[in-house]
Amino acid sequence: MPGEISHEIGRAYVFVLCGCLQRAVKDFTPLFDVYSAPEKLSFKGLSGSDYSFDLSGHIHATEVFIESKGYKDGNSLLDAYREFLAKAYCTTVQFSRHQRDQFWFATNVPFGTSIGRKLVDSQFVSDSLRSSKSPGAAAILGDAAIDDGHVRSLASRLAIGIFTDSFIKVMGTLYRFRPGDNLWNATKLLHGGRMPVSHYDSVVEQVVRMNNLRDPNHIRSGQRLHLPWYGISDFGLES
């Protein structure tokens, strides 16, 4: 999709934006990501085509499905959001256990600025699933009829989080260490597969200071740490 970044950087943004959500939303806990547990996040659309979300989690005993989009600019992001709405609609319509779940769209680029808060309005959702649907949404929905009651219910359970790169650099992100992870490879993961600074020792010093760590070489699996984020320069953004 035009404007979307490479696979490795896209993967980095899934974890970066997940960490931003954990820092910003009290009581939100991530459960699965599409890279380690695709079967937990994959569904069939009303057309029979496959689709998936990037992340899932829970908040206050409610399940949350999350689409994470790292983009260079917002030119094609509105179409990606409409596709996300189609995914959310299909999930809540086809599976009774998901009829009360929340659906979040997290990105690093502002979009739909002429629409504003109406992005989560039931009328906008209805239009996006009907006359204004994107090609991606059309592939998921097919010719299925859209139920207004389900649309109104879905609209009340949508949320959009926009964390710009400049803001993430200030706030940092949260990362849950998995088996086999260490600070070196976690830092590279969050920066698209590359070490973001020339002196790794400066990263270690900052992580120790941010988390009051005694020994950065002994991080437990499952441990969550506040990590610095330096931006990704590979696709033309500031480093």
Image (cartoon, grey):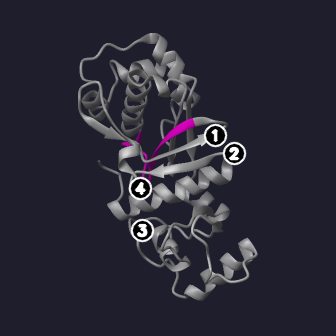
First in residue order: circle 2 vs circle 1: 2
Indicate the position of residue 211 as horizontal and vertical percent values. 72, 72
Closer to viewer: mark 2 or mark 4: 2
Give how far apart the Cα atoms at labels 3 and 4 are: 14 Å
Closer to viewer: mark 1 or mark 4: 1
The amino acid type, in three-letter code, at marker 2 is Asp
Mark 4 — residue?
A: 72
In the displayed structure, would residue 203 be above or below residue 27? Answer: below
Query: What is the secondary structure assignment of the residue under circle 4?
Result: loop
First in residue order: circle 1 vs circle 4: 1
Mark 2 — residue?
A: 27
Mark 3 — residue?
A: 192
Q: Are marks 3 and 4 in contact (CB under 8 Å)?
A: no
In the displayed structure, would residue 53 be above or below residue 158? Answer: below
First in residue order: circle 2 vs circle 3: 2
Residue 40 placement: quadrant: top left
Q: Residue at x 31, y 38 (%)?
A: 51
Closer to viewer: mark 3 or mark 4: 3
Mark 1 — residue?
A: 59
| Residue density around tag 4, few if under 14, some if 14–19, many if 20 or more, within 10 Å | some
First in residue order: circle 3 vs circle 1: 1
Q: Residue at x 48, y 35 (%)?
A: 112
Magenta segment boundaries in residue numbering: 63-77
